[in-house]
Amino acid sequence: MALPRILIVDDEPQIRSLLSLAFTRAGFQVTTAPSGLDAVGCCSSQAFDVVLSDVRMPEMDGHQLMGWIAANHPQTRTVLMTGYDATCDNCAYSPRCPLIAKPFKSAEVVDAVKQALAA
C-alpha cells in the first residue's frame, strides 16, 4: 500500500521542518513548500492526498491556496493552520478544510490530517 502523500505549506522553515519530521514518522510521504505559489507549482506537477497549509503567508495566503486546490484538485483534502485567523469567517472553503490553531502539538496536527483523510 502506498504511503499517503502530504504537502506542507508554511513560510516558517522551523514549522515546515517540525511537521515534516512528524508526518514522516507517522508514515507519510512528505513534500514541503515555503509559499502558496510554490505549493501551486508542487500540486501542478504531482498529486497529493492532503495539503496542510498556514493561513497567513506572503503573495498567496492559505485561503487563496485552498480555493485554487478546490478548483483544480477537488479530490485533494485540505487542512489549514493559523495563529491569527482562528475563525476563517471570510473563507468560502473553510467548511471543506479543518482549521488547526497555532501553537499546536505535532501529534494533534497528524491526528487532524488523518481524520481529514478518513472523511
Image (spheres, rainbow, N blue to C red):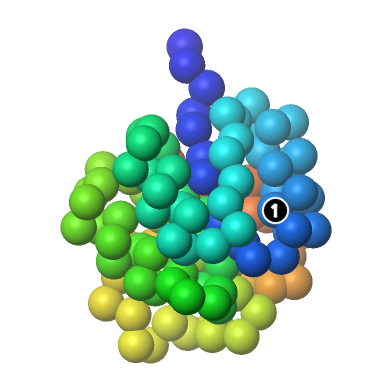
Observer able to see residue 77 = yes
Question: Secondary structure beneath disc 1?
Answer: helix
State the residue at coordinates (48%, 55%).
38
> Toward the viewer: 50 or 111?
50
- Residue furthest to the top: 1
Kind of residue at disc 1: Arg
> Toward the viewer: 101 or 42?
42
Q: Report whether 15 appears left or right of 51.
A: right
Rendered view: 75 above or below 69: above
- Residue furthest to the left: 71
Residue 6 rendering spot, x and y as whole percentages: 52, 40
Q: Report whether 51 appears left or right of 77.
A: right
> Toward the viewer: 113 or 19?
19
Rendered view: 35 above or below 102: above
Residue 110 rendering spot, x and y as whole percentages: 63, 46
Rendered view: 46 above or below 70: above
Observer able to see residue 111 = no
State the residue at coordinates (52%, 22%).
3
Quadrant where the C terminus sits is top left
Residue 24 rendering spot, x and y as whole percentages: 69, 32
Residue identified by numbered label 1? 16
Residue 72 rendering spot, x and y as whole percentages: 22, 51
State the residue at coordinates (69%, 72%).
102
State the residue at coordinates (44%, 61%).
37
